[in-house]
Image: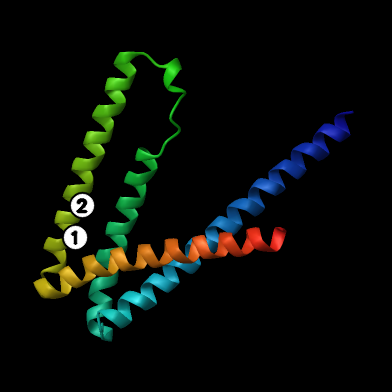
Amino acid sequence: MKYLILILLIFSGLWQLQSQERDDSHRKKIKELKTAFFTQELNLDKKKAQQFWPIYNEYESSLHELRKREHRDIPNLECINEDEAKEMLEEYVAIEKQDYLLKQALFNDLKEIMTAQEIIKLHQLEDRFHKKLIKEYRARKEREQEEEE
């Protein structure tokens, strides 16, 4: 019985590790696509890219941490009281403020190496990239569903 439990625990751990590796692989691929897309669309030469990417990567890292806070597990709303709900709302507002401050800092840092027009273009490219990513994700899900049928 102990061996069976041990085997099940190992299998469960391997399953989670494989799932995490797959997620990491997808994130890495998305990051590569985004880097290529931005570099091409912003016409970043080598010098400007060396200045741009550390600034942008720091912003994305901070934003990722902020999103993890925002999307933490939300308990069943029937199981929380009004005070806890108010705290959650305050946390959401604090996250939105930090999101604004992050974007403001990004724009200020980028002003040192880019024109205002290029920064606006970057903002538009972020939206285009995310929309394209969502569109491709939905198309892939539809293909998978069709293959299952």
Identified at 12% across, 74% down, the residue is: 117
| Rendering coords of residue 98 (x, y %) | 21, 44
| Rendering coords of residue 132 (x, y %) | 40, 67
Q: Is residue 107 left or right of residue 77?
A: left
Q: Which mark is residue 76?
A: none
Q: Is residue 7 above or below residue 79?
A: below
Element type at mark 2: helix
Crowdedness of circle 2 by 10 Å Cα count: few (<14), some, many (20+)? some
Mark 2 highlights which residue?
102
Q: Is residue 4 above or below residue 18?
A: above
| Rendering coords of residue 79 (x, y %) | 45, 16
- Say which amino acid is labelled 1: Leu
State the CA–CA distance, disc 1 to disc 2. Answer: 6 Å
Residue contact at pointers 1 and 2, CB within 8 angstroms: yes
Mark 1 highlights which residue?
106
Q: Is residue 111 left or right of residue 22?
A: left
| Rendering coords of residue 7 (x, y %) | 82, 40
Q: Looking at the image, which is closer to me, 146 or 116?
A: 146
Q: Looking at the image, which is closer to me, 62 or 96?
A: 96
Identified at 86% across, 29% down, the residue is: 2
Res 112 → quadrant: bottom left
Identified at 36% across, 76% down, the residue is: 37
Crowdedness of circle 1 by 10 Å Cα count: few (<14), some, many (20+)? some
